[in-house]
Every structure is written in structure tokens, then in C-alpha cells.
Amino acid sequence: NSKKSDDEVKLWRETLNGTSYISALCRPDLAGIPRYFHLDHAEIPLSPHQSRLKSLIRLLLNLRNIMIVNRSLIMLALEQATSHPPQNVNPSPTVSTPTYNKQLV
């Protein structure tokens, strides 16, 4: 049981370290936009086919939204975990029910 408790503490510390690292990486740039990679511009070779271009743009927008949502969820979970530590750290007691008697009285 001590090992399990130690492992939980280690996991918690690793989670905090990882979240702090992500937070440090995602500081807002000069425009106030938090980014994983500070890019000023990118060149993407496009196909002359409009259907492929629309699909590529839709994919890039979806990836951007996924990154924004995932980062905010990680930060929200960290804030909740630090402000609301687990209340029930002990395992719940086992409740047993009486055995069922099939005979009718």
C-alpha cells in the first residue's frame, strides 16, 4: 500500500512538471496568441484542385481547435486539482448485504 501511495505521489509530481513545461512553452507571442511553435509564416504547397484545398484548410482548422481545447483542458484540470485536492484519500469501506433467503415464510 505504501508503494501505491508513493507511485501516486510520483505520478502527481510528473503531471505537475509536464503541465508547467507546457505552460512555459505556450507563453503568448507579441500578438498575445499562445503558441507551441512561434511561426511567423508557413508555405504550404497547394493543389490546383479546390476540393483538396478545402479539405486541407478544414483539417488545419480542426487541428488548431484540438490543440486549443486540449491545452485549455489540461490547464483547467491542473487548476481544479490544485484548488480541490482529493477529499477521500482512504478507500471506501466495504458494505455487505445480507444473503438472500429463497424460502418463503
Image (cartoon, rainbow, N blue to C red):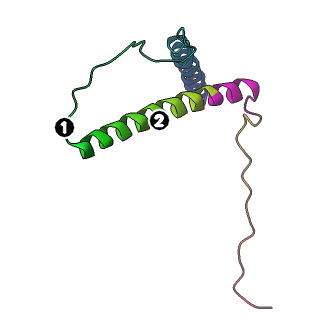
Main SS class of the magenta portion in the image: helix
Q: Position of residue 103 (x, y in %)?
A: 72, 88
Q: Nearer the viewer, residue 102 or 15?
A: 15
Distance in Å between CA atoms under marks 2 and 1:
27 Å
Indicate which disc, 2 or 1, sits on the residue closer to the N terminus. Answer: 1
Whether residue 83 appears in magenta in the rendering, the answer is yes
Q: Position of residue 89 (x, y in %)?
A: 72, 34
Q: Quadrant of residue 12?
A: top right
Taking the image as shown, residue 70 lies to the left or right of residue 104, namely left
Which label is found at residue 48?
A: 1
Task: Tell me the mark number nearer the camera, choosing from 2 and 1.
Answer: 1
Q: Which residues are magenta?
A: 76-86
Mark 2: amino acid: Ile
Neighbourhood count class around disc 1 (C-alpha, 10 Å): few under 14, some 14–19, many 20 upward: few
Where is the N terminus found, in terms of image quarters?
top right
The image quarter containing residue 91 is top right
Q: Is residue 13 left or right of residue 57?
A: right
Determine whether 69 is above or below 92 in the image: above
Q: Is residue 101 magenta?
A: no
The residue under label 2 is: 66
Amino acid at pointer 1: Pro
Q: Residue at x 48, y 18 (%)?
A: 35
Tell which of 29 and 83 is nearer to you. Answer: 29
How far across and down, in percent of the image, does residue 73 sit?
58, 32
